[in-house]
Amino acid sequence: MITLSTLKKYKKEGRKFSCLTCYDALFAKMMQNAQIDTILIGDSLGMVVQGHDSTLPVSVDDIAYHTANVARSNQHALILADLPFMSYVTLEDAVINTRKVMQAGAHVIKLEGGAELADMVATLTAAGAPICVHLGLTPQSVNVFGGYKVQGKSEDSAAKLLADVQAVVAAGAAILLLECVPAALATQISQTVDVPVIGIGAGPDTDGQVLVMHDMLGVTHGRTARFVHDFLTDERNQTGAYTGSVEGAFALFHQSVIEGSYPRPEHQFL
Ligand code: KIV
């Protein structure tokens, strides 16, 4: 069973860890068989499960439902779950909704934002809920950003991101997740903080790597992001024990993260 202590130990040892989004029991079981270290019940379920065009319509009950389905069948991974859009604007809402999602089976709660979350992170952590702070491209703020854009490219936005990181780590954040930030900035952050850092579109040097499950199985329609790799049709998944299976794709992702062969230079932003 992977815990926060395991991830901290991995960070000290330089052992990378894998993370995939998951929303249901059978995929969660396959991820367990493939030794995936951490699972995220992400509000990306709004797009890949519910068919919306953003994460905004997802409710706390949706997240709790999918978290319970995953938690029932995976006894190996550390389970992270999102609090969705507008469900943690006030501390009172954050406490009520964190309780609901943790009682459904999450071990860690993920919130999107920066320094403005510091008091919330401190309160929830003191009450027994470890918090992962998602920084960089935070999809719940897509309408503020005016689209899904790489963050931290200018000097000012990089400085703001670094200040946000310091503030939430000082407040007690247990994990950071960096989405779509230049690889060099993600390297700097990962080397500066002593909490595990998960990356998606953040280059090869974060402590862990996450992908949306559907993306890494090639189950997409239309354009995929630069950092996505299809592990299902990858030729390394066509031989050996798994021979082209979904479970093989999960195992190949895990192995590729650990050995450092994913992400490759073409997957990163500069
Ligand atoms: O909701 C989600 O799936 C996420 C990942 C993109 C990191 O937050």
Image: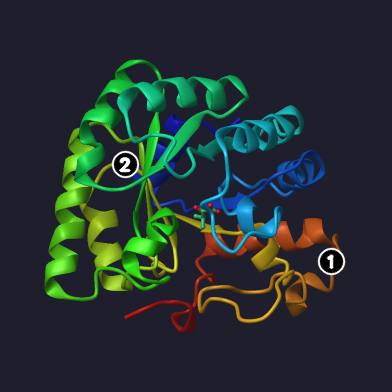
Find the residue positioned furthest to the bottom: 266
**Residue position marked by numbered label 2 in the rendering:** 195
Pick whichever, 208 or 124, lies toward us: 124
Identify the residue under disc 1: 240
Residue type for callout 2: Val
Q: Residue at x 44, y 69 (%)?
A: 201
Would you say the beta carbon of the disc 1 residue lies within 8 angstroms of ligand 1? no
Quarter where residue 216 is shown: bottom right
Q: Front-most of 182 and 243? A: 182
Please tell me in which quadrant of the rendered image residue 33 appears: top right
Q: Amino acid at mark 1?
A: Gly
- Separation of residues labelled 2 and 1 (CA atoms): 36 Å
Place of residue 205 in the rendered image (x, y in percent of width and height, measured from the top left): 37, 64
Q: Considering only order in the chain, which callout, 1 or 2, is on the residue closer to the N terminus?
A: 2
Q: Which image quadrant: the C terminus? A: bottom left
Which residue is at the front of the view, 9 or 204? 204
Which one is closest to the eye, mark 2 or mark 1? Answer: 2
Residue 227 in the image: state x and y as whole percent: 51, 74
Residue found 84% across the figure and 66% down from its top = 240
User: Of 50 and 81, which appears nearest the observer?
Assistant: 50
For residue 234, which quarter of the picture? bottom right
Q: What residue lies at 26% left-to-right and 42% top-to-bottom?
A: 194
- Horizontal side of 163 relative to 1 (left or right) equals left
Q: Is mark 2 within 8 Å of ligand 1?
A: no
Which color scheme did the rendering employ for the protein? rainbow
Q: Eyeballing the image, is 141 above or below 153?
A: above
| CB contact under 8 Å: marks 2 and 1 | no
Q: Residue at x 41, y 23 (%)?
A: 129
**Residue 165's x, y, as percent?**
22, 49
Vertical arrangement, residue 102 with respect to residue 24, above or below: above
Residue placed furthest toward the top? 127
Q: In the rendering, which numbered label is found on residue 254?
A: none
